[in-house]
Structures are given as structure tokens and as C-alpha cells.
């Protein structure tokens, strides 16, 4: 479902850019200043809307990247947040090493490398 929404947003931005181009074309062909001004304002509205879709798309990409980051764990011994203590990679596996701030317990989380 998320992919469908992303495709629709891309199509929406593209649609807005097409409508802006059409409005500009009509403005350049208009005979009166009043009609020309109307179509230039319509072009500006379509461009603002397209920019809004583009911004939403870029924001969705940033959120998806943030959601893909590994979560910082809590210590199994004292339930305090653990701080990162290193990262390793072996055989297409990512190792995230953490250390408890309070009791110095260490924990390693192994995940499949998503960059491959």
C-alpha cells in the first residue's frame, strides 16, 4: 500500500507540473493582460502544489531511512538505555555493539546488511 501512495504522489507532482506548463502556454498566447495574468497566477498555484508534493516525497524518504536505522536497545540487566560502542561487518551481517551507561553491560545485535 505504501508503494502505491508513493507512485500516486509522484504522478500528482508530475500532473501539477504539466498543468503549470499548460497554464503558462495559455498565458503566453493570451491576447489581453487580464487573461494573461489569470493564467500566470494559475501557473504559480500549480507550481506551489507540485512543490508541496515534491517536499512530501522527500520527507517520506527521510522518514523511511530513519525507520531503517537500528533501534537503540535498553540494558537487559538494569533497563537503562545503552550507548553505541562500535559497528562491525562480516559475511553480509552488520554487528552493532552497545554498552550500558549505568552498569557497563555489553550487548551485540546482529542484522542482515540492508545496503547490499
Image (cartoon, rainbow, N blue to C red):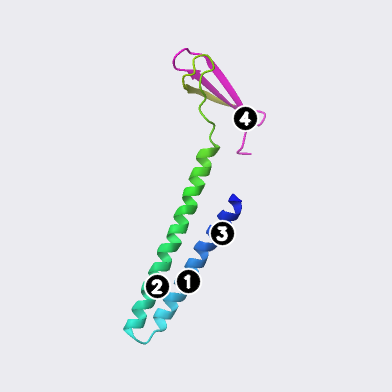
Give the residues drawn in magenta, as a range: 89-116
Q: Earlier in the sequence, mark 2 or mark 3?
A: 3
Q: CA distance from mark 3 to mark 1?
A: 16 Å
> Which of the two residues, 115 or 62, is positioned nearer the viewer here?
62
Q: Residue 42 placed where, x, y %?
A: 40, 72
The residue where tag 1 is placed is 19
Crowding near pointer 1: few (<14 within 10 Å), some, many (20+)? some
**Mark 3 vs mark 1: in front:** 3
Crowding near pointer 2: few (<14 within 10 Å), some, many (20+)? some
Asked whether disc 3 touches disc 1, contact meaning CB atoms under 8 Å apart, the reply is no
Local secondary structure at mark 2:
helix
Q: CA distance from mark 2 to mark 3?
A: 22 Å
Asked whether disc 1 touches disc 4, contact meaning CB atoms under 8 Å apart, the reply is no
Local secondary structure at mark 4:
strand
The residue where tag 3 is placed is 8
The residue at the point 62 percent across, 30 percent down is 111
Q: Which mark is residue 42?
A: 2
The residue at the point 52 percent across, 41 percent down is 65
Asked whether disc 1 touches disc 2, contact meaning CB atoms under 8 Å apart, the reply is yes
The residue where tag 4 is placed is 111
Asked whether disc 4 touches disc 3, contact meaning CB atoms under 8 Å apart, the reply is no
Within the magenta stretch, is there residue 112? yes
The residue at the point 52 percent across, 30 percent down is 71
Amino acid at each position: 500500500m505504501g508503494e502505491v501512495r508513493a507512485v500516486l504522489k509522484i504522478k500528482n507532482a508530475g500532473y501539477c507540473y504539466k498543468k503549470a506548463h499548460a497554464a503558462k502556454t495559455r498565458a503566453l498566447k493570451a491576447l489581453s493582460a487580464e487573461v494573461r495574468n489569470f493564467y500566470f497566477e494559475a501557473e504559480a498555484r500549480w507550481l506551489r502544489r507540485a512543490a508541496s508534493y515534491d517536499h512530501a516525497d522527500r520527507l517520506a524518504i527521510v522518514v523511511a531511512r530513519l525507520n531503517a536505522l537500528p533501534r537503540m536497545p535498553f540494558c537487559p540487566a538494569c533497563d537503562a538505555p545503552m550507548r553505541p560502542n562500535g559497528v562491525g561487518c562480516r559475511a553480509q551481517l552488520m554487528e552493532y555493539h552497545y554498552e550500558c551507561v549505568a552498569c557497563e553491560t555489553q550487548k551485540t545485535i546482529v542484522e542482515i546488511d540492508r545496503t547490499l
